[in-house]
Structure formats: C-alpha cells, structure tokens
Amino acid sequence: MSSTDTPNGSVVTSYAKAATRSITAGGVTYAYRQLGPKAGIPVVFFVHLAATLDNWDPRIIEPIAKNRHVITFDQRGVGASTGQVPDSIEAMADDAYTFIKSLGFDQVDVFSFSMGGMIAQDLLLKHPDLVRKLVLAGTGPRGGKDMDKVVSTTYWDILRATLTRANPKEFLFFNRNATGKPAAKAFIKRLQERTVGRDKPISTKAFQTQLKAIRKFGRSAPSDLSRLTHPTLIANGDNDRMVPSVLSGDLHRRIKGSELIIYPDSGHGGIFQFHDRFSPVAVEFLAH
C-alpha cells in the first residue's frame, strides 16, 4: 500500500484528512503530510514565516493533489519537526534538500510562498537539478528593495491583530477593505477545516529566529537569478505590504522566461483570496 493511500486503498485527496508522518535525516525528525496519487514527480510545498503544516490553504493544496503527489513539511524546529530553527535562509534550504533526499526523490516541483520562496531560491541555486518547476508566490529576491522591512511590518500587524483579537494573517495577508476582510475570514475558516491531529504552533523563539533570517536575506548581496532556467510561475497581490509587490516584478525580470500574475485589490495572500482563479493556473503550470 502506498503511503498516500488509506487502508481501503483509496487515495487521500482531503488535506484535512492527510496523516502527519515523520522521517529522520541529519539528526532532525521532519514532520510531513502527503496526499494525492503517489506517482510521478512530487510537488513539495515550502511554507511561510511562522507557519506549520496547518497553514496551507486546502483550496490551493487539494486541486493540485487531484493528479499529483503533494508533500507539505515542517521546517527544522517548527511545529512537529525537531531541532532548532536555523538563523539563515541558506541553512533552511539545506534542510529542505536533506528532507527531500531523505524521501528518496531525485527531482521535485516546488510550490513556495513568502519565506518559502526565499528558501526555494537558495535551494535551486545550490541544487539546480533537484527541481523541475518552481512556483514563487508572495515572495522576493535576496537583497531586494525593502525586503528587510518584512520584520517591522510583521511586528506591527501582530500588535494590531492582538489589540483587535484578530488573527494576524487578517492584517498581514489581506487588505483591510470591503473585499479583503471577508476574504481573510474565509481563509482563516478554511485553515480550521482540519479538526484532529493538528500541528503545534511555532514557538516565539523560533518565530524570532526566522525573522532574523529574513532580515539577513533582505540585507544580503543579491543572488544571480539569471542562473535559474527552470519554468517559473510568480504570483502575488497588487498591494503586498509584507513582501512589496514590486519584488514579484523584480523576480520576473531576473528569472528568464518566468510567468507573472498580479491579482487586483489584494495583498500578500492574493493567491488565497483568488484561490478559485489561481489554483487552475497552478495546476496547469505544474501539469506538463
């Protein structure tokens, strides 16, 4: 029985029902979930700042998992994975490489969001043959203009959310207007669809270490992204306050042959607000 199958032999297609598994490599036990048919090149999802396995939008995961083997995982020191969070994006990319290889894969597609996109860039630059196709959503390049402002924006929005008893993602990912507010509520609700076997939230210390790594990435010399020749899909909202939308255009210019989608009247979580439009595009992009 393949590990994405249920005992009765049917393939798991609901992210809420995907079992949390673990694998140990390099002294770290990584928590991960998988769904979809276990065949072909898998799509590995690289998650955002402070996120665990429970932070992926099922409306993004599930359409891709209809025909693809999908894998989500907790970075070292996050959620149910053991160890300490690294203080650099490069080290996180090394961990991602260790995790992917420990599962026995020689080639994967990568779907990355926000900090996950920073990790994905470093992974591809170091191990270009490991990745076939790349999705970069809500992210930016090393040394990109105002990348280091992610930290202050994050702290400010967490404070605003605390004062209003809201989820910080409502401020960080969505516009605070008539379209953004309901989209935020709907997104948060979708993240609650899993009711059993939920991941444990990131610790404050781990979260602060991730922020330091992002700041370092933002203040570093730019990487030579002209070396990336992989088919690449870049997406964002037109008003990303966390990782400024202009940086998606910067990535598009620097990664030859990449595709760029900017969704209107949306922020950092544009792909979640427009999941009904974005998911089919992502499925099509990853299909061939």
Image (cartoon, helix red, strand yellow):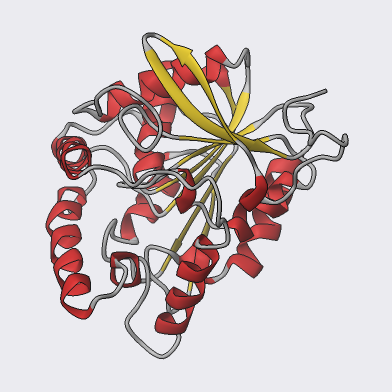
Query: Which residue in the rendered view is the most extreme toward the top?
Result: 26
> In the image, is 145 to the left or to the right of 256?
left
Q: Position of residue 175 (x, y in %)?
A: 35, 78
Quarter that holds the C terminus: top right
Looking at the rendering, which quadrant does residue 286 occupy? top right
Left or right for 270, reference 282: left
Of 190 and 284, which appears nearest the observer? 190
Is residue 262 visible in this depiction of the protein?
no
Q: Is residue 261 left or right of residue 153?
A: right
Q: Is residue 63 above or below residue 181?
A: above
Estimate the x, y position of residue 210 in percent, counting from the top left: 22, 39
Picture coordinates of residue 268, whole percent (x, y): 37, 63
Task: Decide: is 19 above or below 129.
Answer: below
Check the image and name the residue furthest to the bottom. 178
The residue shown at (39%, 28%) is: 81
In the rendered image, the vertical position of residue 163 relative to residue 268, given as above or below:
below
Residue 220 picture location, percent across and down:
16, 33
In front of the other: 222 or 42: 42
Q: 230 or 113, which lies in front?
A: 113
Q: Please give left or right for residue 275 compared with residue 187 in the image.
A: right
Q: Report the residue at 35% width, 50% height from top.
A: 250
- The picture quadrant where one finds residue 160 is bottom left
The foreground one among 8 and 140 is 8
Q: Quadrant of the rendered structure where residue 211 is? A: top left
